[in-house]
Amino acid sequence: MNAPIPQHLIPEIHQRETPAALIDALKTRFAERCSTALVVREQHGRDESSFAAPPPAAVIFAESTADVADAVKLASQYKVPVIPFGVGSSLEGHLLAVQGGISIDVSRMNRVLSVNAEDLTVTVQPGVTRKQLNEEIKSTGLFFPIDPGADATLGGMSATRASGTNAVRYGTMRENVLALEVVLASGEVIRTGTRAKKSSAGYDLTRLMVGSEGTLGVITEVTVKLYPLPEAISAAICSFPSIEAAVRTTIEVIQVGVPIARVELIDVNTVRMVNAHSKLGLREEPMLLMEFHGTPSSVKEQAELVQELASGHGGQAFEWASTPEERTRLWTARHNAYFAAIQSRPGCRAISTDTCVPISRLADCLLASVAEVDASGIPYFLVGHVGDGNFHFGYLIDPDKPEERETAEDLNHKLVARALSLEGTCTGEHGIGLGKMDFLLSETGDGAVEVMRTIKRALDPKNIMNPGKIFTL
Amino acid sequence: MNAPIPQHLIPEIHQRETPAALIDALKTRFAERCSTALVVREQHGRDESSFAAPPPAAVIFAESTADVADAVKLASQYKVPVIPFGVGSSLEGHLLAVQGGISIDVSRMNRVLSVNAEDLTVTVQPGVTRKQLNEEIKSTGLFFPIDPGADATLGGMSATRASGTNAVRYGTMRENVLALEVVLASGEVIRTGTRAKKSSAGYDLTRLMVGSEGTLGVITEVTVKLYPLPEAISAAICSFPSIEAAVRTTIEVIQVGVPIARVELIDVNTVRMVNAHSKLGLREEPMLLMEFHGTPSSVKEQAELVQELASGHGGQAFEWASTPEERTRLWTARHNAYFAAIQSRPGCRAISTDTCVPISRLADCLLASVAEVDASGIPYFLVGHVGDGNFHFGYLIDPDKPEERETAEDLNHKLVARALSLEGTCTGEHGIGLGKMDFLLSETGDGAVEVMRTIKRALDPKNIMNPGKIFTL
């Protein structure tokens, strides 16, 4: 059972009414692609967060930009909120109809529109998922590297400025979206950029939309960069005597400029959980999982250098893999961490943190926070995209014990406060959504949030685009 | 002598009056750091563009964020424009007081505030120039790669979303600015981000400000990424039988994923000019200048691969350089191209173009445009950051012959139209400024420009921040 939304996070909890006339108009326009069935609405009224709200009044299954534009125009006419929906993998309550309204499901807009292999770009509809994209472009010898874990849609990944394990080398959606097509609050459709690799042509509307969490428009096309599949890929795992040793190794790897493609931390807790879950027999110590991309000789060179740096910090039990099968086996621990953790405490719910700090502060931030969680008695897992200074605690709480949720929230507050004091951010890749509005204020200050609000009010005067997310108006 | 501003580009040419009371207030606040001397005003009323306008009414020499904030507050009180000024290297009329107002010179705000070598970041005041920055951080083993040619300030480079020769590997200011401090139109000071490498915390105000050309605020601090100085650097020049052969080679280099650090095209015209200017004795054919960064073995590997690709397109006369002195000699042709071109036609003025297209369209765009310029009879030089699809014609016009300027403008119009039809942009790195407003409309459409205007109106209701640039209100 989901917990109720903390009242202080949703000052505009009042659900605006959805007039029957709007539903009628939507049914006329979309016929059976406008659903008011409770089961459909409920499925679109939640995400992977622990928040809950009443479901949207209707769900529109859009199949084209024109569909989205028409739905938004009708909603605008009745001043009713619209909430874009991809596959529902958001972690921060982005998809919840906290002010009522209609959900616009773009998952049927799932065509790859144009692959421009020569330019290393592809344009897709927003419902294309990252796995689908990589499957469809396989024959080009190119790939799309951003991997947030979930098989999210490109539209959703753009809207939350997602990243994941490959970001240390390939960047986030911020660096990889070249242009968007967006339906604005008026229903008007704009393009935010071209396929040129760089541009100084006016305000960077692409990056204004990337990370705007549906509050400024509905993304209906996404042009992203692609990369040549590396000639060689090598993966490695390495155990360390302490988190600090693993983190110090990571810091040195980044500082000397090794173009490492992935470097993920798994703490000893989590190693134990995946050992139990997947029978891996890993050394029960903190571990780094790494991946190197390049030519065979550069991969070898990177790997040797990293091994040397790791050894300097007591890293041992190095294990290497070059074939896809071996790599998959090595990465099992990382891929299964979440499920292993959930199963380690039957019936539990994971509350995920998302702080990101400058890499020189990573050890300080992590070690103090680990000590705090250990002292609290709450079971947890800890994984991190440590090359970027980003890591996630998953507090494994019993949903029937409100005091555990309180403890978890208190731990997260302390963690965020620590990250901010170390010049970091409350969210590296999940977004603000419903739960981090206060953190955003602490992080950027009232002035910067007021700039965001001013932009929102100007571009969405009726406040219909996913209202109640990121900030309150 | 500068040509007058084409009337259609400056619909708001009316210079607003600067009340004597504002000048008095500025003199009271800034004493001798508020100058109304004509020579000072004139120096701040122009840039490297061919536009001209009456100078600003006063120049404030700011020494702190508080100075900037106070100047903006006073200007706001009297609804008078403010125009930020660094070293005056803008190419698009950004610094011209087309609506009157005061110039805020930030060149004395030139301190490197904090070097965070462990995090590969540095925070500087906006008047720090890129050469100064690299000089000051030399001992850290890190460098700031963005090199737009001119020794521009970091504030100015942020405001125009600058890039240059290294962008093919290291990105542009878009990718390299982590956070800004900005004085808004109200005089309020905000920070747009943290030093965390990535973030999903609300709207990306950093990238909204990067490239906003002073129209949304005055940048008073800049945090940028740094990179480890490569262990090895190797440079090469190579001659080709045609521009097409050089461009095809470049396209293949990018497509196979060689992490080349620089790849610059110089056309045969320009080679002749630099031969005459610098007595270089280069083969009079189109030429690529390249640079490779990495470990010694990866540099060797990159270079060998590129040489092989070049040979496939008839590339020859390869010349290599590894020491700094040899590299400087090889790059002489590129560095002196502008001066060599100017001197090739005494008394001429260069009008620079800045289109950028997806790399697969580069040959089409370049070849058709070269044919057009050749047919026009206007002398020109042609250099290009071809790895990014960005290139610059410099039309060398006699400023006393209006028909030559007309021909040059006509050529540029055709070039931009071609670039847009090939999914490119009218400006890769110089910005819109005064001369490209119509191009911006063609490129992004009325709807997107209206979004920009809406943001501008909301954040700067009195229209005092560098008004009359990017778009008309």
Image (cartoon, coloured by chain):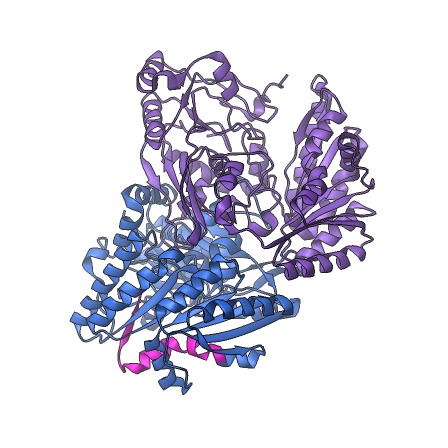
Chain colours: A blue, B purple
In the rendered structure, which segment of residues is drawn in magenta?
A330-353
Residue B433, by quadrant, is: top right
Placement of A111 over or under B3, stated as above or below = below
Placement of B463 over or under A358, stated as above or below = above
Name the residue at 36% across, 81% down: A284
Query: How many numbered circles are shown?
Result: 0
Q: Is residue A339 magenta?
A: yes
- Please give left or right for residue A323 compared with residue A458 in the image: right
Question: In x, y percent, where is residue A61?
Answer: 44, 64
Q: Residue furthest left?
A: A403
Question: In x, y percent, where is residue A249?
Answer: 43, 65
Name the residue at 27% across, 43% down: A446
Say whether residue B253 is visible: yes
Residue B350, by quadrant, is: top right
Q: Nearer the viewer, residue B374 or B452?
A: B374
Placement of B418 over or under A195, stated as above or below = above
Q: Is residue B341 magenta?
A: no
Say whether residue A126 is visible: no
Name the image quarter holding the N terminus of chain B.
Answer: top right
- Please give left or right for residue B321 compared with residue A470 in the image: right
Q: Nearer the viewer, residue A396 or B433?
A: A396
Q: Nearer the viewer, residue A374 or B46?
A: A374
Question: In x, y percent, where is residue B87?
Answer: 51, 28
Q: Nearer the viewer, residue A446 or B371?
A: A446
Question: In x, y percent, where is residue A379?
Answer: 25, 75
